[in-house]
Image: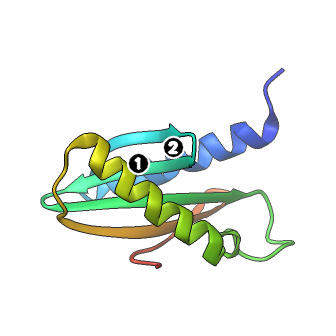
Amino acid sequence: MADPRRALGAHGEDLVAAWYEARGYDVVDRNWRVREGEIDLVLARGRDIVFCEVKTRSSAAFGPPSLAVTPTKQRRLRKLGSMWLSARGHAPTDIRFDVASVLGDEIEVLPAAF
């Protein structure tokens, strides 16, 4: 039987990927994993590379999903972004780190969140 939390997270990532695509971004990578962690979405538009952390919750009982992206998580994502760029042979370009909150079917994207 499928893990309901994993299914909820995958649903949130699908919604956010579609949100970016509707705004002209290409999904370059999803769930890119290395030993140090995972990047949910890597997107590109022109010279922009966006690393997006997606947080999905079924209720707001514990606050908005974006609160789960702590300073420790932000540092890890910066390191992972650098690793992704190195692995892909990308020279530094215009990069940013977004956080997307999904609550039900409502999406809030915080561009350049950190």
Q: Residue at x 61, y 66 (%)?
A: 73
Q: Which quadrant would residue 63 be assigned to in this image?
A: bottom right
Q: How is the image coloured?
A: rainbow
Q: Secondary structure at mark 1?
A: helix
Percent of width and height locating residue 100: 53, 65
Say few, some or many: other residues with alpha carbon within 10 Å of mark 1 (under 14 / 14 to 19 / 20 or more): some
Q: Nearer the viewer, residue 51 or 74?
A: 74
Marks counted in the figure total: 2
**Could you tell me which residue is drawn at 84 percent across and 20 percent down?**
1
Find numbered disc 2 in the image and state the secondary structure of the residue it sits on. helix
* Residue wearing tag 1: 18
Q: Residue furthest left?
A: 46
Contact? badges 1 and 2 (CB < 8 Å): yes
Q: Is residue 21 visible?
A: no
**Residue depicted at 63% across the width and 60% down the height:** 55
Instruction: Find residue 92 and report its horizontal and vertical position in percent.
Output: 19, 62
- The one of 90 and 100 positioned closer to us in this rendering: 90
Is any atom of residue 83 visible in this view? yes
Residue ID for mark 2: 14
Quick one: label 2, few (<14), some, or many (20+) residues within 10 Å? Answer: some
101 above or below 14?
below
| Residue 56 drawn above or below residue 5 | below
Residue positioned 80% across, 37% down in the render: 4
Q: Which mark is residue 94?
A: none
Question: Could you say where residue 79 lies in the image, as x and y percent from the top left?
Answer: 45, 61
Question: Label 1 amino acid?
Answer: Ala
| Kind of residue indicated by mark 2 | Asp
**CA gap, disc 1 and disc 2:** 6 Å
Q: Is residue 97 left or right of residue 26?
A: right
Left or right: 17, with 9 as reference point = left
Q: Is residue 98 left or right of residue 59?
A: left
